[in-house]
Amino acid sequence: MIRKIVKINEEKCNGCGLCVNACIEGAIELVNGKAKLVSEEYCDGLGNCLPVCPTGAIEIVEAEAKPFNEKAVEERLEQKKQREQFSCMCPGSQEKIIERNNTDTASEEKNQKVKETKEELSELVNWPVQLNLINPYAKFFDNAHILIAADCVAYAYASFHRDFMKGKVTIIGCPKLDNIEYYYEKILEIIQSHNIKSITVVKMEVPCCNGIASIVKKAMLQAQKILPYQEVTITTDGGIKE
């Protein structure tokens, strides 16, 4: 049948993933860093993804396409929920709280040890850290300050543990290569299910990283919880962008 449907220009797509988040039917995914229409029957042709695209890579066209299938969309979204449940069952992703002694005395002793050995000590207080693996109902989120960081940040910024991770539950993910809609759903569940004290987002300066900040802000609005929020951008040469 001839109907309205999304058309994506891959050459214009910068892989930011904002359209993935905007499509509530889950019709768009990032594949090899580019937005792709997963299936014609998942697209309702209404174009909720158009306004969020920063490069104009998306348009609505009238073309021969399969009819929109609401039942297929419901089944797809249900499968996503099931994947989330199963991801938390892997032994390597079992919830773990890592105790750190953060008293003043302990901090002084730690700093002295670092000076003597020139060794940076870990500030990680939770496991797992990958957003794909984290259980949104994990106890370590209770009354926590949360750090949500793009994967590349820890490799670009040398003092990531000391300057950003200390005293925070750490979550990492890649908004370009992973399913950003799945990320949004998890962050929303975390915010809704726990008393979160603050959220810090640390991302890279590349355009595809902006999606991770966007979904955090959207999740706070959806949850009707506007939390203390800080956003930091790291340059590709390892500095903090002013």
Image (cartoon, rainbow, N blue to C red):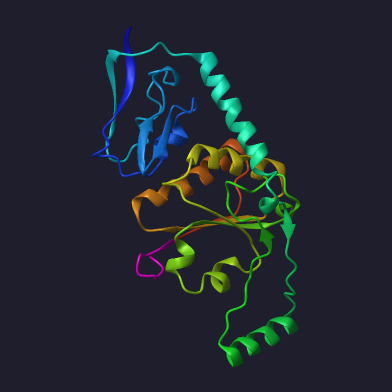
Query: What is the residue that sits farthest to the left in this orientation?
Result: 11
On the rendered structure, is 238 left or right of 72? left
- The spot of residue 97 in percent (x, y) is 74, 60
- Residue 221 x, y percent position in the rendering: 56, 39
Looking at this view, is 102 or 93 the one in front?
A: 93
Q: Vertically, is 26 above or below 68?
A: below
**Horizontal relation, residue 34 to residue 79: left or right:** left
Location of the C terminus (image quadrant)? bottom left
Residue 219 within the magenta-colored segment of the rendering: no
Query: Which residue sits at x=74%, y=84%?
Result: 105
- Choose top left, top right, bottom left or bottom right for residue 51: top left
- Residue at 39% over, 39% down: 31
Residue at (48, 13) in percent of width and height: 69
**Could you say which quadrant of the image residue 234 lies in?**
bottom left
> Which quadrant of the figure has residue 7?
top left
Residue 64 point in image, percent of width and height: 29, 12
Please, which residue is most extreme toward the top here? 1
Residue 166's place in the image compared with 90, above or below, is below
From the image, give the main secondary structure of the stretch colored magenta: loop
- Give the extent of the magenta segment: 233-242
Q: Is residue 65 left or right of residue 185?
A: left
Q: Residue furthest front?
A: 91
Which quarter shows the N terminus? Answer: top left
Q: Nearer the viewer, residue 235 or 84?
A: 84
